[in-house]
Image (tube, rainbow, N blue to C red):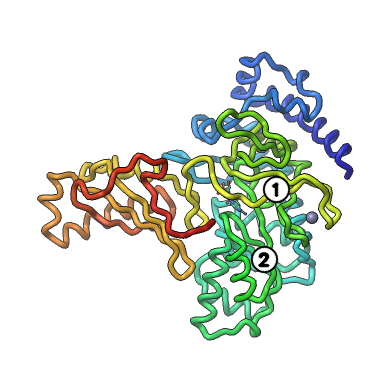
Amino acid sequence: MSRDQMRELQGKRLHKIVEYVYHHVPFYRSRLQEMDLTPDDIRTIDDIVKLPFTTKKDLRDNYPFGLQAAPQNEIIRIHASSGTTGNPTIVGYTRRDIGVWTECMARCLTAYGVTRNDIVSVAYGYGLFTGGLGAHNGVEMVGASVVPASTGNTEKHVRLIRDLGITGICCTPSYALYLAETMDKMGIAKDQIHLRVGAFGAEPWTENMRTEIQERLGLKGYNIYGLSEVMGPSVSYECSEQHGSHINEDHFYPEIIDPVTLKPLPAGETGELVFTTLTKEGMPVLRYRTRDLCSLLPGECPCGRTNVRMSPIYGRSDDMLIIRGINVFPSQVESVVLSMEEFAPRYMLVVDRVNNLDTLQVQVELRQEYFTATLDTPAAIEELSKKLEAKLRSVLSIGAKVQLKAPGTIERSQGKSAHVIDKRQLK
Ligand code: ADP
Ligand code: ZN
């Protein structure tokens, strides 16, 4: 499709989606009314700048179904993504949404060169996380054989990769490195497996990681990007050129804004990525602020695809961390720490990568009265640490190691990441 045809299609779809949310989502109706807008004011894609933004906070404030546009009996799937504190974000999909998602995922896989002759294992987590089932449907649509390996049980997975002659894999880049590590431990060499394509995403990764994964697994690694609020994995994908990721922009319209002034930035500049879903029925979003920082790459791609490309994500405009593919906000840890009377509101998240697996340690200061009573009995320390670890696990969905500290020993700094030490060096 030419750029002009694409913009015309996007304009038509934008008008339709604004009309749809105006009539089906009271939240958007009142936002638009406050701004004195009706769907008739939105005619072309350039009118998008008139529309209000949507944030993760809006989704959380309207938990669970406040932003859902389709009636419940048309929703056939519900996923949830981590919220900042307390409520997760709930995303409902209609049958048509799942169809669009599946097609977008199939486009990604096709760009990576996956065909019906491939056997592809999906090692994103299956469950509330969109990675597993999202990738799964796409592999089936392409007609390749899907192996729903999910995460965990890595040795068994490595044996399957070898024994079934698996040729493609979808997982986080850090899990790909962990697989390589596991192969080494099991004494399985690169030439005993037949992997040739990897779809890696759900977390930021570097060219260095790409080189290492490709070298150790003997495959070509492609980037895949997405987020639950917009759809899940398959919002954008690398083509054979591997110079930026093509956005499925007939369904997800991208803008880059200045995260402070919220003004759109000229083409090519770096800022916060914002998406409007152009066709979604279950939970459409207008100008959703992803908090991901990147740029849109102007110009044609030698591969022949005309849809716009985005650069890799180079950071976030908030303090969200991605640990083993799971979104973690320091404020989640804070809410748990504050809910237990033993602790002072002083904590530190120490994130590291050991043997290619992310680790999270939470250091927390005891209150003086508990410090005196507790810290002289190892059993009491152990018990209190375990109690906090269990609570953290249920809120964060990943395990964290707790280290109790004496009052006044965690350094206080004024900076933005006063609560985080990230040793992983992802940039
Ligand atoms: P998903 O289910 O797709 O992981 P989440 O909502 O849990 O969706 O997380 C989405 C976030 O994960 C994105 O906003 C982005 O910060 C990060 N992310 C996903 N894919 C990539 C990628 N390929 N590169 C960098 N960050 C990514
Ligand atoms: Zn291309």
Q: Which residue is mark 1?
A: 310
Above or below, 49 relative to 359 = above
Determine the image quadrant of residue 9.
Answer: top right
The residue located at (41%, 41%) in the rendering is 416
The residue located at (19%, 58%) in the rendering is 381
Residue 188 seen from this side: yes
Above or below, 424 relative to 410 = below
Looking at this view, is 213 or 286 the one in front?
213
Q: Callout 1: 10 Å neighbours few (<14), some, many (20+)? A: many
Which quadrant does the N terminus fall into?
top right
Q: Which three-letter amino acid code belongs to the residue tagged 1?
A: Met
The residue located at (86%, 54%) in the rendering is 304
Badge nearest the viewer, 1 or 2: 1
Residue 71 seen from this side: no
**Left or right of 103, for residue 289:** left
Looking at this view, is 368 or 412 the one in front?
412
Q: Which residue is mark 2?
A: 221
Looking at this view, is 357 or 281 the one in front?
357
Q: Position of residue 70 (x, y in %)?
A: 66, 33
Q: Position of residue 12 (x, y in %)?
A: 82, 30
**Left or right of 181, for residue 41:** right
Is disc 1 in contact with disc 2, using a CB cutoff of under 8 Å? Answer: no
Q: CA distance from mark 1 to mark 2?
A: 17 Å
Q: Callout 2: 10 Å neighbours few (<14), some, many (20+)? A: many
**Left or right of 234, for residue 407:** left
